[in-house]
Amino acid sequence: QVHLVESGGGSVQSGGSLTLSCKASGTIFNIHNMGWYRQPPGNQRELVAVQISDGTIHYSNDVKGRFTMSRDSAKNTMYLQMNSLKPEDTAIYYCAADWGVYCYSDFASGYDMDYWGKGTLVTVSS
């Protein structure tokens, strides 16, 4: 079982930055896939960034160049550095994890990871 807890959400003005953290506990050693998703108000959940089993990190086109995902295995923590934030980045941000072996396209096309945090709210004002 994997337990994930997000933190670092808050309110920021357009153009600002935030760093989200996702602390993992449980049986997580060498878990293959970890990612960040978000759900804007009134919209469906969408993939933001994911690290897949080969170690590569992939970003959605909406955040590419502005967001950076990283993992600190020693701390069992994953991060999402968000720069140049826009009002359309307003959403509940979730971290997720999965043991399987997948390609980026699997997650981009909607495959749901096995483990999820409860989310942290990010609000970007104009």
Image (spheres, rainbow, N blue to C red):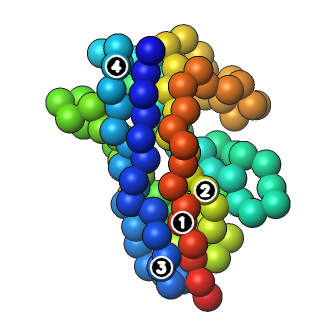
Could you tell which of marks 4 and 3 lies nearer the N-terminus?
A: 3
Q: CA distance from mark 2 to mark 1?
A: 6 Å
Q: CA distance from mark 4 to mark 1?
A: 26 Å
Q: Are marks 1 and 3 in contact (CB under 8 Å)?
A: yes
Q: In what element is the residue under mark 4?
A: strand
Q: Which residue is mark 1?
A: 122
Could you tell which of marks 4 and 2 lies nearer the N-terminus?
A: 4
Q: Looking at the picture, which amino acid does disc 1 mark?
A: Val
| Quadrant the C terminus occupies | bottom right
Q: Is residue 53 left or right of residue 109?
A: left
Q: Looking at the picture, which amino acid does disc 2 mark?
A: Ile
Q: Residue at 55% of width from left, 61% of height from top?
A: 121
Q: Residue at 70% of width from left, 46% of height from top?
A: 46
Q: Which residue is mark 3?
A: 12
Q: Is residue 33 above or below residue 36?
A: above
Q: Is residue 40 above or below residue 38?
A: below
Could you tell which of marks 1 and 3 lies nearer the N-terminus?
A: 3
Could you tell which of marks 2 and 1 lies nearer the N-terminus?
A: 2
**Of 59 and 35, which appears nearest the observer?**
35
The image shows a total of numbered marks equal to: 4
Q: Looking at the picture, which amino acid does disc 3 mark?
A: Val
Q: In what element is the residue under mark 3?
A: strand
